[in-house]
Image (cartoon, grey):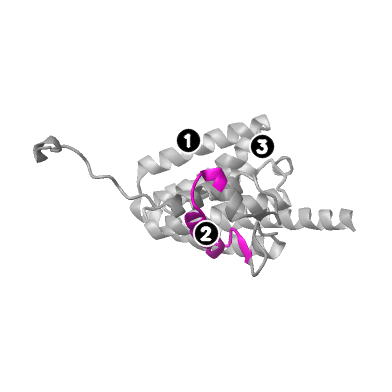
């Protein structure tokens, strides 16, 4: 066949099957499709994705390094059982990444990004008003994720995309009670308003208040569960 038959043909890009599987497993973990302590086997995962065990093993390795799965010698790979300490550590990292992202976002001062984040909060506030808690959860975390992405740092984005999955796992495991926080919408609006005003310290302060309030609620929820189960 003449070489001229391929003048506009784009090359076929290599696909990292291990990362594709890891990405899908992150989604499933975030969606609560696996329960804490559940074992995930190479065989069942390979069968589900119709792949060999090699890329599954690589995906497990990546997620274990990220703390989203736990590997136990001679036993296998499990969904971790998260403690309050794990949640506190998760939010410590989140605050560091989001704080740095806020400072970078403010220095870039992109009105279009602020408008997009504001639109997200409008939808979030509407869900809170309607009591649509599951959708409110999604929009809550989407706001924080998009805030980090708007900073334009590939490394901050990568760090946050991993930690936000564990955040979802934490919230599902320990429970967060939206109805008990009628002022929740203002926590996020205060962060954005300070960023729009160019007030980096005010944005960080609003972020710390947000995180401290969520952690307080999660600790109380854990204490209630422990007391009930004792």
Image: 183 above or below 94: above
Q: Which residue is mark 2?
A: 57
Q: From the top left corner, tell me how far across and down residue 124 is, in percent.
A: 57, 37
User: Which residue corresponds to mark 3?
Assistant: 133
Q: Position of residue 146 (x, y in %)?
A: 46, 46
Mark 2 crowdedness (10 Å alpha carbons): few <14, some 14-19, many ≥20: some
Mark closer to the chain start, 2 or 1:
2
Q: Are marks 3 and 2 in contact (CB under 8 Å)?
A: no
**Residue 50 coordinates in the image, percent (x, y):** 51, 44
| Residue at the outermost front position | 1
Residue to which mark 1 is pinned: 119
Mark number for residue 7?
A: none
Q: CA distance from mark 2 to mark 1?
A: 40 Å
Q: Give the SS element for disc 2.
A: helix
Q: Nearer the viewer, residue 39 or 181?
A: 39
Residue 146 on the magenta segment: no
Tell me the element at label 3.
helix
State how far apart marks 1 and 3 are (Cα).
18 Å
């Amino acid at each position: 066949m003449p070489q001229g038959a391929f003048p506009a043909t784009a090359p076929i890009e290599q696909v990292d099957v291990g990362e594709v599987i890891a990405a899908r497993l992150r989604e499933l973990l975030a969606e609560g499709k696996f329960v804490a302590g559940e074992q995930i086997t190479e065989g069942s995962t390979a069968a589900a994705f119709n792949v060999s065990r090699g890329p599954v093993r690589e995906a497990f390795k990546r997620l274990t390094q990220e703390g989203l799965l736990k590997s136990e010698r001679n036993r296998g790979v499990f969904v971790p059982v998260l403690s309050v300490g794990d949640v506190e550590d998760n939010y410590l990292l989140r605050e560091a990444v989001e704080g740095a992202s806020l400072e970078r976002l403010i220095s870039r001062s992109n009105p279009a990004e602020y408008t997009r984040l504001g639109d997200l909060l409008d939808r979030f506030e509407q869900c809170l008003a309607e009591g649509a808690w599951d959708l409110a959860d999604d929009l809550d975390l989407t706001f924080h994720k998009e805030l980090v992405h708007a900073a334009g740092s590939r490394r901050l984005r990568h760090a946050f995309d991993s930690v936000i999955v564990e955040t979802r796992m934490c919230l599902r495991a320990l429970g967060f009670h939206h109805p008990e926080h009628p002022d929740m919408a203002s926590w996020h609006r205060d962060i954005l308003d300070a960023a729009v005003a160019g007030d980096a310290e005010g944005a960080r302060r609003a972020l710390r208040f947000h995180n401290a309030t969520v952690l307080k609620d999660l600790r109380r929820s854990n204490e209630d569960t422990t007391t009930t189960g004792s």
